[in-house]
């Protein structure tokens, strides 16, 4: 039978129109804020292209800012068990990292047995997770944290545990029953079926499972997920796996940069978890890593052993001002705006923040100490705009009245991170 056209009274149409107008303006408004013509050049919109911001929306209410927490893979790989997960939850609390926003405790691959049970359900490995995932979720929730789990949009996970392809509804129900809050969904053993076919069924299954679960797609950037994953998940990996080297971290930052215009509240580009604290990079390189991840609105998922943090690692992970850049409500991904030097190794990355502010990173990827100069043209600031500048690693205002350009000496592979606040704004706020 053909569907009847509904005849509503006029006021209902009016309300629908208002609601529609609201949802559109809710998306566009925060961006308009950043367009004060006396401060920004017309090039601002090209430099910080946000044309795709919020266009695709999963709308499960999650990921209004990038997710923060911890993930087991980078440090522990398959050497995980319920004690490690519980101790990690304890450490997130005792270090104060949880209070800073690191609330997801995410179990990666290797938590399950190699086969399903006779009912076809996933089973936690009885040797390593004898109390089961529900008990672990209760423990983590008892601390005010959230539990994440891992599965795969294929026949098996990458470490050859059962995958969820064709088991989406059952597995989503299991995760919801256990009290899981987050699912990372990998791409191994995918039978050659395109990601666009394999990832939406788990979205729908999670949607029907009766629990709000953060959906983190991990298809390694196959088929350019930024172009379609916004209506499927809350974040999508844009690259292959990170490893604990300068080469890997810089390559991944550049690859993720390409998709900046697609990020926004509800859905984020994911250049993979942090390696900060794992020992393969220098302090300066790790400082660059977290600075750029924060600026790119990447998920901040710690990938080291938080039970044994050095003072330096803790300092890098716990910088409130850097975290605030990442969690800024405007939710616009910052990007590489200018390069100079040999092979473009002197770099400026920047992005709009709420309140007409800009985050600016001066990143020296060369092998010698160098001075990097950011001109107002490169940043999209109108000439004549005066800014005050705050250094987020030194935690202090380093200049109160800067016009036309700003220079700083930057150590080898280091990254200085600043917030530029245009004067007109600072003054009008008084
Ligand atoms: C893939 C993912 C990684 C990690 C491993 C686990 O390589 O991309 O992030 O989850 O699988 O096996």
Image: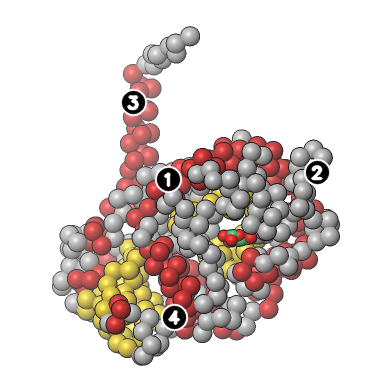
Ligand 1 visible in quadrant: bottom right
Rate crowding at label 3 as few (under 14), some (14 to 19) or many (20 or more) other CA atoms within 10 Å: few
Rate crowding at label 1 as few (under 14), some (14 to 19) or many (20 or more) other CA atoms within 10 Å: some
Q: Which residue is mark 3?
A: 14
Q: Residue sitting at 60 percent across and 77 percent down?
A: 278
Label whose residue precedes the other's in the sequence (3 or 1): 3
* Disc 4 secondary structure class: loop
- Whether residue 130 is visible: yes
Labelled pair 3, 4 in contact (Cβ < 8 Å): no
The quadrant the C terminus occupies is: bottom left
* Numbered mark located on residue 332 in the image: none
Q: Which residue is mark 2?
A: 117
* Numbered mark located on residue 393 in the image: 4
Q: CA distance from mark 4 to mark 1?
A: 36 Å
Q: Which residue is mark 1?
A: 228
Which numbered disc, 1 or 2, marks the residue closer to the eye? 2
In which quadrant of the rendered view does residue 198 lie? Answer: top right
Question: Would the CB of label 2 be found within 8 Å of ligand 1?
Answer: no
- Whether residue 176 is visible: no
Which numbered disc, 3 or 4, marks the residue closer to the eye? 4
* Disc 1 secondary structure class: loop
Which numbered disc, 4 or 1, marks the residue closer to the eye? 1
Label whose residue precedes the other's in the sequence (3 or 4): 3
Residue furthest bottom in the image: 369
Q: CA distance from mark 2 to mark 3?
A: 54 Å
């Amino acid at each position: 039978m053909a569907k009847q056209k509904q005849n509503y009274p006029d006021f209902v149409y009016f309300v629908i129109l208002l609601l529609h107008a609201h949802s559109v303006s809710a998306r566009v408004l925060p961006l308009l804020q950043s367009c004060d013509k006396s401060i920004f050049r017309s090039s601002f919109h090209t430099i910080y292209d946000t044309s795709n911001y919020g266009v695709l929306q999963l709308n499960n209410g999650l990921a209004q800012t990038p997710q923060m927490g911890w993930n087991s893979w980078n440090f522990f790989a398959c050497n995980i068990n319920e004690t490690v997960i519980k101790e990690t939850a304890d450490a997130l609390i005792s270090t104060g990292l949880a209070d800073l926003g690191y609330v997801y405790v995410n179990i990666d691959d290797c938590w399950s047995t190699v086969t399903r049970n006779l009912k076809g359900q996933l089973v936690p490995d009885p040797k390593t997770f004898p109390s089961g995932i529900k008990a672990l979720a209760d423990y983590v929730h008892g601390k005010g944290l959230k539990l994440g789990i891992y599965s795969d949009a294929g026949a098996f996970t990458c470490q050859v545990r059962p995958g969820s392809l064709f088991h989406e509804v059952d597995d989503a129900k299991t995760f919801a029953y256990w009290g899981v809050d987050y699912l990372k969904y990998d791409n191994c053993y995918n039978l050659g079926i395109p990601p666009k076919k394999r990832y939406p069924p788990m979205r729908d299954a999670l949607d029907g499972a009766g629990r709000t679960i953060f959906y983190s797609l991990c298809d390694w950037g196959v088929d350019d997920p930024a172009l379609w994953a916004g209506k499927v998940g809350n974040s999508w990996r844009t690259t292959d796996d990170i490893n604990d080297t300068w080469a890997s971290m810089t390559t991944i930052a550049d690859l993720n940069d390409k998709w900046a215009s697609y990020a926004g509240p509800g859905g984020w580009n994911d250049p993979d978890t942090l390696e900060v604290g794992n020992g393969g990079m220098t302090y300066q390189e790790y400082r660059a890593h977290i600075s750029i991840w924060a600026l790119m609105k990447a998920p901040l998922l710690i990938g080291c052993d938080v039970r044994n943090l050095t003072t330096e690692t803790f300092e890098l992970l716990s910088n409130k001002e850097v975290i605030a850049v990442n969690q800024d409500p405007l939710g616009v991904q910052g990007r590489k705006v200018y390069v100079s030097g040999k092979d473009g190794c002197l770099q400026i990355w920047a992005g709009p923040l709420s309140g007409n502010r800009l985050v600016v990173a001066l990143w020296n990827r060369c092998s010698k100490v160098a001075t990097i100069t950011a001109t107002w043209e490169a940043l999209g600031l109108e000439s004549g705009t005066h800014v005050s500048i705050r250094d987020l690693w030194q935690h202090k205002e380093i200049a109160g009245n800067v016009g036309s350009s700003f220079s700083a000496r930057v150590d080898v592979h280091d990254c200085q991170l600043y917030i530029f606040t245009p004067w007109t704004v600072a003054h009008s706020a008084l």
